[in-house]
Image (cartoon, rainbow, N blue to C red):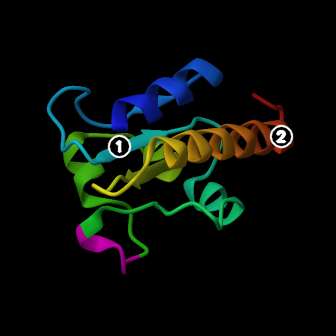
Amino acid sequence: MRDSLLAQLEAALDDVVVNGSRTLRLPGNLNVSFPGVEGDTLLLSLPDIALSTGSACSSASAQPSHVLKALGVGPWRERSAVRFGIGRFTTAEEIDYAAARVVESVRRLRSLAPGGI
C-alpha cells in the first residue's frame, strides 16, 4: 500500500522527495516532502486525509520532526514534510483516493506560490 501511494504521487507530481530510506522503513509509513508546499498548509487543505507534519512520537508538538533532524534533512524539507500512516485496514481505494487528493492539493498550492513551481 505504501509503495502504491508513493508510485502514484511520483507519477503525477514533479519533485516528490522521500525522507529516509526507500527500502529500510516501516511498511505502513511514508514520509515525503513536496518542494514549494508547506506541510502545514497541505495538511489544512486535506481535512479528509489523515496526515501529520511531525513524527508519530511527537505528534502533539509543533516542533519539526526530530527524526528528520537526525536524518540531516534540511530546513525546507522539514517544513514541507508530511507523514502518511497506513494501517492494516487501509484499502486500495483509500490509497487511490488519498493520492488523488494530495496530487490535486499540491498542484493547487504550488500554483499559488510566489514564482510558481
User: Is residue 59 within the magenta segment?
Assistant: yes
The residue positioned 57% from the left and 47% from the top of the image is 98
Q: Quadrant of the C terminus?
A: top right
Q: Quadrant of the N terminus?
A: top left
Q: Secondary structure at mark 1?
A: strand
Segment colored magenta? 57-61
Instruction: Choose top left, top right, bottom left or bottom right for residue 36.
Output: top right
Q: Which residue is mark 1?
A: 30
| Foreground pick, 70 / 4 | 4
Task: Please indicate whether residue 31 sits to the left or right of residue 42 in the image.
Answer: left
- Vertical placement of 104 versus 65: above or below? above
The residue positioned 42% from the left and 30% from the top of the image is 4
**Residue type (three-letter) at the residue carrying disc 1:** Leu
- Vertical placement of 3 versus 85: above or below? above
Q: Secondary structure at mark 2?
A: loop
Main SS, magenta region, reads: loop
Give residue 114's mark: 2
Residue 92 appears at what percent x and percent y? Answer: 46, 41
Total numbered labels placed on residues in the image: 2
**Residue type (three-letter) at the residue carrying disc 2:** Pro
The residue positioned 19% from the left and 26% from the top of the image is 23
- Vertical placement of 85 versus 27: above or below? below
The residue positioned 26% from the left and 36% from the top of the image is 20
| Foreground pick, 77 / 6 | 6
| Foreground pick, 88 / 10 | 88
